[in-house]
Amino acid sequence: MILIFDYFETILNTKSMDFNRGLYVFWERYYQDKCLFSDMKKYGEDLFLVLMEKHRGGEEYPFVENELPLFAKKFGGDKVTMSVEEEADFLMRCNDFVLDPEIERFLQKCSQMNIPMYVLSNSGFRAEALMEVLNRFGIGKYFTQLWSSANFGRIKPCREFFELAIETALEENPEEIRENIVFIGDIYETDVVGAHQAGIKSAWLNKKDRSDENGWATYDIKSASQLNGILEGE
């Protein structure tokens, strides 16, 4: 068995999310002598509309690669990149993350069973920063590799994005086959649909108790406490 996880609301839950919490600190450090925060906030909202349009077309809009240079061009700053640590700091300011103890126990159990685990995430933040956040929660060690759409350029359910993870996982675990891969995620339209199109199993963290009208979810579970059923084939 190989497990590939979604990131947001699967591995880490978000108590609250506000992009402006991260943006304010960014403004305070690099732009407060160049513009008002209200101006930067308004421009951030304009860029969010661009992001949504990109997503509708299946493309990602990376924060560091695409947005930071635009802030600099707009307001005359010279901060056009971030280190991995700075990007992780920004992400954690925007998101008040919580690690579900059930998820942590499940990861520990899978690690003890030597089950290879990976992460495939839709995110405007780079894979290295996402992994840095997992490391800060003490769980990055469980994952062999993490892929972010910020690096890849397209978002789930893109077949090629899934194939990147699947092919790598199978190369690293030649004793396994595609039929033994399970993708675990909470969004039907990206996680379940993407896994189905890629020909792998899916475990849908169906927190809102929606109906699986297509019947594509291999496992339809309501909470992380039920993840052990995957290991038992229930």
Image (tube, rainbow, N blue to C red):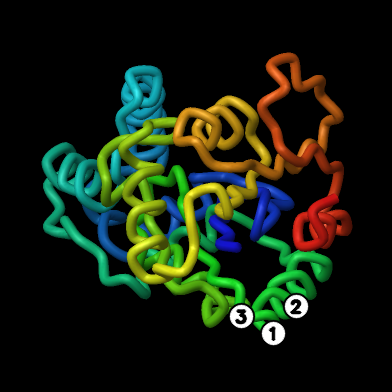
Secondary element under disc 2, as helix, strand or loop, is helix
Which disc number belongs to residue 7?
none
C-alpha separation, residue under disc 1 versus residue under disc 3 = 5 Å
* Of pointers 3 and 2, the one earlier in the residue sequence: 2
Residue 108 spot, x, y in % from top left = 72, 79
The answer to whether 143 is drawn above or below residue 51 in the figure is below
Residue drawn at point x = 32 percent, y = 49 percent: 164
Residue kind at label 3, given as amino acid type: Asn
Image location of residue 80, percent across then percent down:
16, 56
135 and 116: which one is in front?
116
Residue drawn at x 38%, y 25% is 55
In the displayed structure image, the side of residue 176 where residue 101 appears, left or right? right
Q: Mark 1 and 2 residues: CB-CB less than 8 Å, in contact?
A: yes
Residue farthest along the top direction in this orientation: 213
- Image position of 111 (left or right of 26): right
Residue position for label 3? 114
Mark 1 vs mark 2, CA separation in Å: 5 Å
Q: Are marks 1 and 3 in contact (CB under 8 Å)?
A: yes
